[in-house]
Image: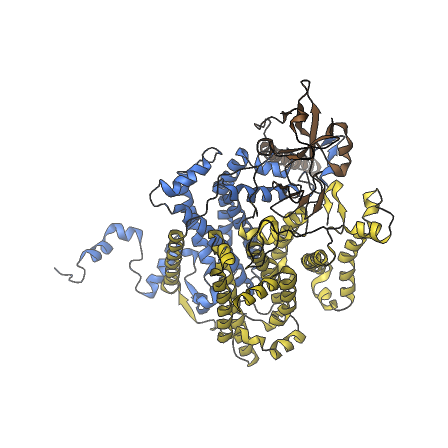
Chain colours: A blue, B yellow, C brown
């Protein structure tokens, strides 16, 4: 035995070809290894290699942007799990939700999803609050602030579309009220100002079955069609858009000079 | 004694009183101009952002919430599972308001002494992401996960009776984060409160970096350098959004009537709210000749008022107090700022018109769904 | 190819591209509106006029059809149970003699006229006629709005 240093299970794993092929830089002990570790990891290279010192101070960042992203991941995972048991039809939706807490092991998945969604709304608001209070929306970060505002709006929409899915009294009345606001959209809703101007002769172009509310609900009232459309938007449509915008948002944080620094 | 305090709080929380108080107190707490700043210091309100002030605010909120939890009526509302986020929201908004303002005041004092701000470690002070940031993220994720798990195990998600399209629950509420909008719906028509105002909020927020041309205080907490923009933002966020959410959650009961926090939510409470349109005031009550049949003639007074409201102040201010702003921003951006500000102020104005003269609509053309 | 000819073809190409893109998005929007709606029938019989008590709001068809039927000394009318504010279902408060919406506090008189709260206009009335067998027939596909002067229409009010 010439090399006495490398013995034991952990060391031999760290020395194996498999481990080295995954983590090329090895255990990050030296400064160079730590920098290369961040650079070479697809997940960690979201971050720069080095940061100004204030960027790791919780008092400055509040960590709310990171927590929003983490909660989004929690919601994605718990949401996918919930989809295994939930059928978006008027007949089954309510009972499926009941079964989630009674017939399924680990019956708190729905709680994690719901409270996580509430927490994400708060985290996103507080993130915006922090960015405002530190003046971090100022040039050159104007565009990224605008992207963030759209994501804030999408977060609320995601939560709102999810609100209908349990198909209980709370759900349909919140959505009825919300969807009826769409009815009042100027020109696009059949009870909005200006909609009656869009007519050919006696035929209204914007009527109860051809306005924006109908497109949202897939019917004249909150029923089967609305449940399905909200389900699809909630599980696929909106997460798809917000994921793209998140990529843009994170990319621009780096490209606009990293976390805001005093100027 | 306790009942006396509760009765007092009930009266105090009426929107007419609480909203008026907030509007009057707000500029002294977050002073937008030097005149308010003078009084802010004289009244000792800057002490709110010290450690002691923060503790007092924390104690104040906690005492009121504790008072609520042990009260028969308020306790029922506070204990609703869906209202837990609001309590978290109240605490976190106050905490972070305190944190950001106290950091800002400290930085302002440093800058007044000619020192660097707290966040400024100089360009050479750098830390490595691994491990200095990664372990913080790791701890934050673990704490958040624990928090979520405790919350989820301790509090089952609410599930009411199965959907019944013919029976509206009383009161029927939107999700809590939309209760600010739902509160606006009491005063404005859906096309404004539900469509135009949310759009303006989004557009206004997105426009913010393009109309705030103050290059100072970017990347650190500061108040003295940008008091006006912080005042406007916090006024919108704290009073017109968070406060209205609290009102909508805790103070709106059956039939969407207003209830004090310690009042019982009785379905039988009758509040007469007979609202009158401006056109009726003008043609029927003042001129006593009855409503004209053509809607545009009928609503002419309201239309003139609305046009003047959005048309006159920009012109007057551009020649007077805000002349410097016009020169800096140019006509288009100045017009956008003023339009957004006037739209924001339209909400409190309409509230007061409702409370004082029971005004329903300034312009009422229900024939084509155009009501303001 | 001459330069002018090239530019002509270029603009034709771009126009075709814009037209195709526009048409494509129009098709996507049109896709959101199905041709057939599977919703319950809109007209139904509610019984004979004498089945309804005088000056009472009849709530028997609120649950199944979202309609209130009111019989007065002159005749009958059918009121929609959809609040004109944001579509909640108001409650008939017999002691206060009014419809009161729980969502935002709109109040309507027995006739359907709005008098308090944020509702911008009166409740809608549905077409109400006598069927051949003497029963009252309510047709929800035809609605009458007060603010448009449609309540004077003969089918908005069934004279008995």
Furthest residue in direction top, as rendered: C132
Does residue B212 show up? Answer: no
Considering depth in this image, is B218 or A224 the residue closer to the camera? A224
Question: Picture coordinates of residue B128 (x, y %)?
Answer: 39, 65
Q: Is residue B189 visible?
A: yes
Between B319 and B144, the one lying in front of the other is B144
Residue placed furthest toward the bottom: B113
Image quadrant of residue C52? Answer: top right
B361 horizontally vs C64: left or right: right
Left or right, residue B276 beside residue A245: right
Q: Is residue C26 left or right of residue B358?
A: left
Residue C125 % position (x, y)? 70, 34
Quadrant assignment, res A193: top right
Relative vertical location of residue B247 with respect to residue C76 in this rendering, above or below: below
Instruction: Determine whether, in the image, residue B19 is placed left or right of residue A23.
Output: right
The residue shown at (43%, 37%) is A95
Q: Nearer the viewer, residue B57 or B111?
A: B57
Image spot of residue B197 (x, y percent): 65, 52
Q: Quadrant of the C terminus of chain A?
A: bottom right
Q: Residue furthest left?
A: A1
Quarter of the image that includes the N terminus of chain A: bottom left
């Amino acid at each position: 035995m010439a090399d006495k240093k490398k013995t034991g299970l952990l060391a031999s794993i760290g020395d194996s070809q498999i481990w080295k092929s995954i983590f090329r830089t090895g255990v990050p002990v030296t400064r160079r290894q730590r920098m290369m570790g961040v650079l070479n990891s697809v997940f960690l290279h979201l971050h720069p290699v080095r940061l100004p010192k204030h960027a790791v101070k919780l008092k400055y960042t509040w960590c709310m942007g990171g927590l929003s992203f983490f909660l989004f991941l929690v919601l994605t995972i718990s949401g996918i799990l919930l989809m295994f048991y939930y059928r978006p039809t008027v007949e089954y939706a309510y009972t499926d939700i009941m079964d989630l807490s009674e017939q399924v092991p680990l019956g708190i998945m729905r709680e994690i999803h719901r409270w996580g969604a509430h927490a994400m709304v708060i985290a996103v608001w507080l993130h915006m609050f922090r960015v405002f209070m530190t003046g971090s929306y100022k040039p050159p970060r104007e565009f990224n602030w605008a992207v963030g505002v759209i994501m804030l709006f999408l977060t609320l929409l995601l939560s709102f579309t999810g609100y209908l899915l349990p198909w209980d009294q709370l759900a349909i009345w919140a959505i009825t009220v919300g969807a009826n606001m769409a009815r009042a959209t100027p020109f696009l809703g059949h009870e909005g100002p200006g909609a009656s101007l869009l007519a050919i002769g006696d035929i209204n172009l914007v009527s109860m079955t051809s306005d924006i509310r109908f497109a949202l609900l897939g019917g004249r009232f909150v029923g089967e069609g609305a449940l399905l459309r909200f389900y699809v938007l909630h599980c696929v449509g909106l997460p798809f858009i917000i994921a793209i915008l998140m990529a843009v948002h994170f990319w621009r944080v780096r490209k606009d000079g990293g976390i805001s620094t005093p100027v | 004694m306790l009942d006396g305090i509760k009765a007092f709080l009930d009266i105090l929380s009426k929107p007419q009183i609480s909203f008026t108080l907030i509007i009057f107190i707000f500029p002294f707490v977050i002073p937008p101009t030097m005149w308010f700043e003078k009084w802010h210091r004289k009244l000792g309100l800057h002490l709110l952002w010290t450690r002691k002030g923060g503790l007092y605010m924390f104690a104040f909120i906690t005492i009121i919430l504790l008072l609520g939890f042990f009260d028969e009526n308020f306790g029922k509302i506070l204990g609703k599972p869906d209202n837990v986020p609001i309590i978290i929201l109240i605490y976190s908004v106050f905490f972070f308001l305190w944190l950001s303002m106290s950091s800002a005041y400290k930085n302002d004092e440093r800058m007044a002494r000619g020192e660097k701000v707290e966040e400024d470690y100089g360009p050479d002070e750098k830390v490595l992401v691994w491990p200095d940031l990664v372990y913080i993220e790791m701890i934050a994720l673990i704490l958040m996960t624990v928090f979520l798990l405790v919350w989820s195990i301790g509090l089952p998600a609410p599930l009411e009776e199965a959907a019944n399209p013919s029976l509206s629950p009383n009161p029927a509420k939107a999700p809590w984060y939309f209760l600010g909008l739902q509160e606006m719906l009491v005063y404005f028509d859906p096309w404004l409160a539900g469509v135009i105002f949310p759009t303006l909020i989004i557009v206004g927020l997105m426009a913010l970096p393009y109309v705030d041309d103050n290059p100072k205080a970017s990347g650190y907490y500061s108040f003295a350098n940008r008091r006006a923009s912080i005042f406007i933002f916090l006024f919108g966020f704290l009073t017109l959004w968070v406060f209205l959410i609290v009102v909508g959650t805790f103070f709106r009961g059956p039939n969407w009537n207003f209830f004090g926090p310690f009042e019982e939510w009785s379905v039988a409470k009758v509040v007469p709210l007979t609202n009158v349109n401006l056109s009726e005031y003008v043609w029927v009550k003042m001129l006593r000749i009855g409503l004209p049949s053509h809607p545009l003639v009928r609503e002419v007074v309201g239309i003139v008022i609305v046009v003047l409201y959005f048309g006159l102040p920009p012109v007057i201010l551009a020649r007077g107090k805000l002349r410097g702003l016009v020169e800096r921003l140019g006509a288009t951006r100045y017009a956008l700022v003023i339009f957004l500000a006037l739209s924001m102020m339209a909400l409190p104005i309409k509230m007061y018109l409702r409370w004082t003269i029971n005004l329903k609509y300034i312009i009422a053309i229900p024939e084509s769904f155009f009501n303001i | 190819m001459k330069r002018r000819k090239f530019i002509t073809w270029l603009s034709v190409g771009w126009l075709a591209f814009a037209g195709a893109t526009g048409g494509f998005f129009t098709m996507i929007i049109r896709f959101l509106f199905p041709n057939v709606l599977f919703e319950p029938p809109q007209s139904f019989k509610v019984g004979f006029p004498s089945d309804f008590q005088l000056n009472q709001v009849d709530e028997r068809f609120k649950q199944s059809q979202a309609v209130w039927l009111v019989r007065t000394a002159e005749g009958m009318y059918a009121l929609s149970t959809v609040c004109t504010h944001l579509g909640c279902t108001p409650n008939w408060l017999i002691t206060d003699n009014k419809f009161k919406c729980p969502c935002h506090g709109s109040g309507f008189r027995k006739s359907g006229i709005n008098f308090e709260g944020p509702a911008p206009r009166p409740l809608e009335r549905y077409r109400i006629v006598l069927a051949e067998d003497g029963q009252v027939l309510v047709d929800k596909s035809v609605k009458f709005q007060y603010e448009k002067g449609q309540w004077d229409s003969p089918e908005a009010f069934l004279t008995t």
